[in-house]
Amino acid sequence: MNIKSQKDFFSGLMFMSIGVAFAWGATTYSVGTGARMGPGYFPLVLGVLLAILGAVITFDSLVIETEDGDKIGGFAWKPVTFIILANILFGIMIGGLPSIKLPPMGMIAGIYALTFVASLAGEEFKAKECFVLATILSIGSYLAFIMLLKLQFPVWPAFITG
């Protein structure tokens, strides 16, 4: 069978593999019934739906002809590297790094660091837009996690709060 769209084919395979992994992982929890759902019910249903979606996308890639064949491109290392680095930096900023005696810098500084490093993954960097986005995310996160949910983690750097 001939692959008509490589992008769709590999996307479908990715969806199927992630869906099967979630569904399989959910079987270790109590699934329950539709009326009394257990903790494994939701991830099982989502995993099955994702696997079905992947199967449909893969089937379409084998059947539906596209104009240029949608060849798969090279792997985008820069965005992956910066997004992963931004998340690691955010974790370090919130929790600190006791092994090198780096104190927690708090959620607000972590969000600013995350936003600025993650924005480097794109084609262009605009500091003003990044600053506005980080400010909106910081205010929203403070309201949602600290004020509404009352979660207990550092908001400000340790040298400010003492």
Image: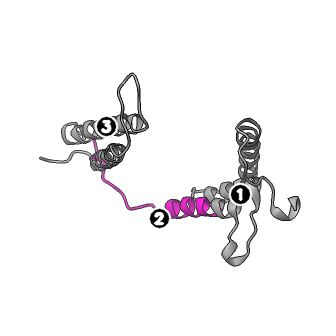
Q: Mark 3 points at which residue?
A: 48
Q: Which is in the foreground here, disc 3 or disc 1?
A: 3
Q: What stretch is highlighted in magenta?
A: 66-89
| Residue beneath the point at 52% across and 64% down | 81
| Image label count | 3
Tell me what residue is drawn at x 40 percent, y 61 percent: 75
Closer to the chain start, of discs 3 and 1, is: 3
Q: In which quarter of the image is residue 158?
A: bottom right
Viewer-closest of 75 and 94 = 94
Q: Where is residue 24 in the image (x, y as percent from the top left)?
A: 31, 46
Label placed on residue 97: none
Nearest to the eye among marks 2 and 1: give it: 1
Q: Name the residue under label 2.
A: 77
For the point 76% across and 55% down, which residue is it?
154
Quadrant of the rendered image containing residue 20:
top left
Vertical order, 36 against 98 (above or below): above
- Position of 130 with respect to 68 (left or right) is right
Residue type highlighted by circle 3: Val
Residue 143 in magenta? no
Q: What residue appears at the point 21 percent right and 39 percent down from the top-left corner?
A: 59
Quickly name the residue at label 1: 110
Label 2 is placed on what type of residue? Trp
Q: Which of 140 and 71 is in front in this view?
A: 140
Disc 3 to disc 1: CB gap under 8 Å: no
At label 1, the amino acid type is: Gly
Q: Where is residue 100 in the image (x, y as percent from the top left)?
A: 69, 77
